[in-house]
Amino acid sequence: MALFLYVKGRATMTTLDRLPVVIPANNVPGPKQGWWTYEDYAALPDDGKRYEIVDGVLYMSPAPNIIHQRIVGRIFRYLSTYVEDAGLGLVLSAPTDVKLSPMDVFQPDVFIILNENREKIKEKYILGAPDLVVEVASPSTSGFDRREKQDVYAHAGVQEYWVVNPDAHTVEVLVLEAGKYVSLSIFRGKAILPSRVMPEFPVAVEQFFPEA
C-alpha cells in the first residue's frame, strides 16, 4: 500500500514505498572503491550482510526474502539430483565465494562446476568461471543481475546464465556466444529449459516455484 505525505501542495512518497536495492558499500572500512580485492573482501568481519565485488567496487545486497530462498532451495535440489547423482559434477549455492578475477567476487544463488573443471574448486572459494550460474532476481537485485553481474559473467567465460523471475515464474536462459550472452528465450510453465550445459535436464520450469 502506498503512503503519501502532502508537502506544500504536492504528494511526496515516503520511505515505505522504497524497496531495498543493491548499493555500493561506501561506508565499509577498507580500500577505496575501485580497489577492493578478494583478500580485502575475505578480511571483512561477518556482520550478517551479503557483499560482492565488481571491478574492485564493493556492493552490499539486501537480505533475500523467504520466497527467494524457497526457489533457490528447489533449484538447488533439482540440479543436485540431476548433476551430482549422475556423477557429472558439483552443485553449490550462496554464500560460496566465486573468484572470477582478483577484483570480481560473487556469491551466485546456485551454480555448477562440471567434473572437467573441478580444479577450480579450492578450499575456501571457486577460482574461475562456473559452467552454469543461476541468479534468482527480484525488484531489489534485478538491475544488478542484469547489468554488472551479466557483464562480468560473460567476460569471465560463464557458459550459461539463468535469470529466474520469482514474480512472473519464468526463467531466461542466456548462453555465451563470441564473448556475449544470447538469450534462448524466456520459459515458464511446463517448458523444459534448453540447457547446453545439461542438455537433458528433465525438470519443467513450474517445478522451481512453490505454489504457496
Image: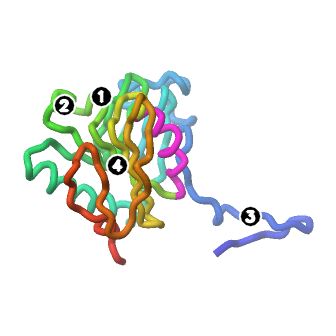
Find disc 2 in the rendering and name its residue. 117
Looking at the picture, does residue 77 appear above or below residue 38?
Answer: below
Pointer 4 or 3: first along the chain? 3
Q: CA distance from mark 4 to mark 2?
A: 18 Å
Under mark 3, the amino acid is: Met
Whether residue 181 sits left or right of residue 119 in the image: it is right
> Quadrant where the N terminus lies?
bottom right
The disc label shown at residue 13, or none: 3
Pointer 4 or 2: first along the chain? 2
Find disc 4 in the rendering and name its residue. 134
Q: Closer to the camera, 196 or 159?
A: 196
Pointer 1 or 2: first along the chain? 2
Q: Residues within 10 Å of mark 4 (few under 14, many from 20)?
A: many
Residue 198 percent location from the top left of the image: 22, 47
Q: CA distance from mark 1 to mark 2?
A: 9 Å
The disc label shown at residue 128, or none: 1
The disc label shown at residue 207, or none: none
Q: Closer to the camera, 138 or 188?
A: 188
Image: magenta residue range: 139-153
Residue 61 in view: yes
Does the CB distance between marks 1 and 2 fall below 8 Å? Answer: yes
Under mark 2, the amino acid is: Asn
Under mark 4, the amino acid is: Val
Pointer 1 or 4: first along the chain? 1
* Residue depicted at 56% across the width and 55% down the height: 20
